[in-house]
Image (cartoon, rainbow, N blue to C red):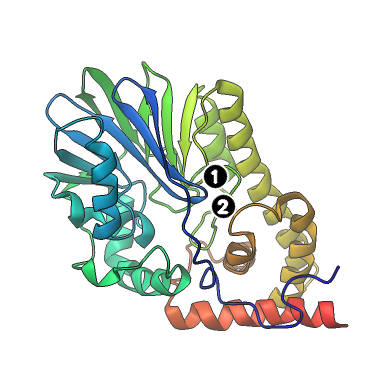
Amino acid sequence: ACMEGNTMAKAFASAADLDEKKETFAKLADGVYAFTAEGDPNTGVIIGDHGVMVIDARATPVLARELMDQIATVTDKPVTHVMLTHYHAVRVMGASGYNANHIIASKDTLDLIEERGEQDFKSEVDRFPRLFRSVESVPGLTWPDVVVDGTLTMRFGGRDLVIKQVGRGHTKGDTIVWLPEDRILFAGDLVEEGATPYCGDAYLNDWPQTLNNLLALNPEQMVPGRGEAMRIEHECIRAIEGTRSFVTDMMSSVRMGFAAGKSLNDVYVDTHRVLKPKYGDWVIFEHCLPFNISRAFDEASGIVDPRIWTAERDNDMWHSLQDALKELDDD
């Protein structure tokens, strides 16, 4: 069977993905919920004494209001806290829709919003048009007013709630929410389930150790950045280890190609071939891989911090790498 895309050019990133996803609002514990949508970005919900914390804001205020409708089925308390696991637009641009008292993020996430939030917003709208429908409802960048440097522990709804950075991975600002008494982990995009990790802004050398730090928490339930919530311990372990093996397999293939003096295009073709049998059926595989391997190639070549993606850089890079793959298929 010929690979997809031989007869026609592939649509950029997720531009062609317009199907609505089935949404699930699942109760993990008293007052703790996971909002998932078949591989679209997930959101966590924790009900406190006086208000609700939302973990990751969704892409637009219109999507935020859809989540508010779900929250209203379980509590009449207002959303008072929005916690951002990292700076990506699909996670933060809906924040204004909750009218929360506080928006919480790590200092590293704030730095990234200042440095590249504007470019990231523009590039992500082009990558994910479906997630950014009603994009005109976004009033501008989302700015945290509670900035966490390391760890913040609070009592929320009669339980300890820990907001902390456990290492760099998906971005340098990745921040988890951990409920130690319930052993529930909100991992953000450090962990994916049945979805391809996006590594365009990643620290790939650090990411595996950061995942080991998550394993050391021994979570019994987990909400990954994408994919369904894990309801038992061995599922949590499998998802964390699955993400770790993707990152490790990709980085070792890219390092090998770079060490052999190969071009980015050749390394892309080789690594795509290595990863596809094992991970090709994960959501957004073809979308992510050009960004992922570009970043891995940069990191292998000693570029420590991810370069800023712009809508123009996105398109040039993505099409050039997809063309390299297509030429191979056509031979």
Q: Quadrant of the C terminus?
A: bottom right
Image mark count: 2
Q: Which residue is mark 1?
A: 192
Residue at the image position 21 percent from the left and 25 percent from the top: 156
Secondary element at tag 2? loop
- How far apart marks 1 and 2 lie (CA) works out to 6 Å
Kindly indicate whether the residue at mark 2 contacts the one at mark 1 (C-beta within 8 angstroms). yes
Asked whether residue 259 appears in the rendered view, the answer is no
Residue at the image position 42 percent from the left and 20 percent from the top: 183
The disc, 1 or 2, on the residue closer to the chain's N-terminal end is 1
Crowding at dot 1, Cα within 10 Å, few <14 / some 14-19 / many 20+, comes out as many
Crowding at dot 2, Cα within 10 Å, few <14 / some 14-19 / many 20+, comes out as many
Q: In the image, residue 302 lies at what x, y percent?
A: 59, 65
The kind of residue on which mark 1 rests is Glu
Q: Which mark is residue 219?
A: none
Depicted 330 relative to depicted 252: above or below: below
Q: Which residue is mark 2?
A: 197
Q: In the image, residue 25 lies at what x, y percent?
A: 38, 37
Q: In the image, residue 100 lies at what x, y percent?
A: 14, 46
Residue at the image position 18 percent from the left and 49 percent from the top: 98
Q: Which of the 4 image quarters holds residue 32?
A: top left
The kind of residue on which mark 2 rests is Pro
Query: Closer to the camera, 285 or 320?
Result: 285
Query: Closer to the camera, 242 or 108?
Result: 242
Q: Quadrant of the N terminus?
A: bottom right
Residue at the image position 36 percent from the left and 51 percent from the top: 86
Asked whether residue 112 appears in the rendered view, the answer is yes
Secondary element at tag 1? loop
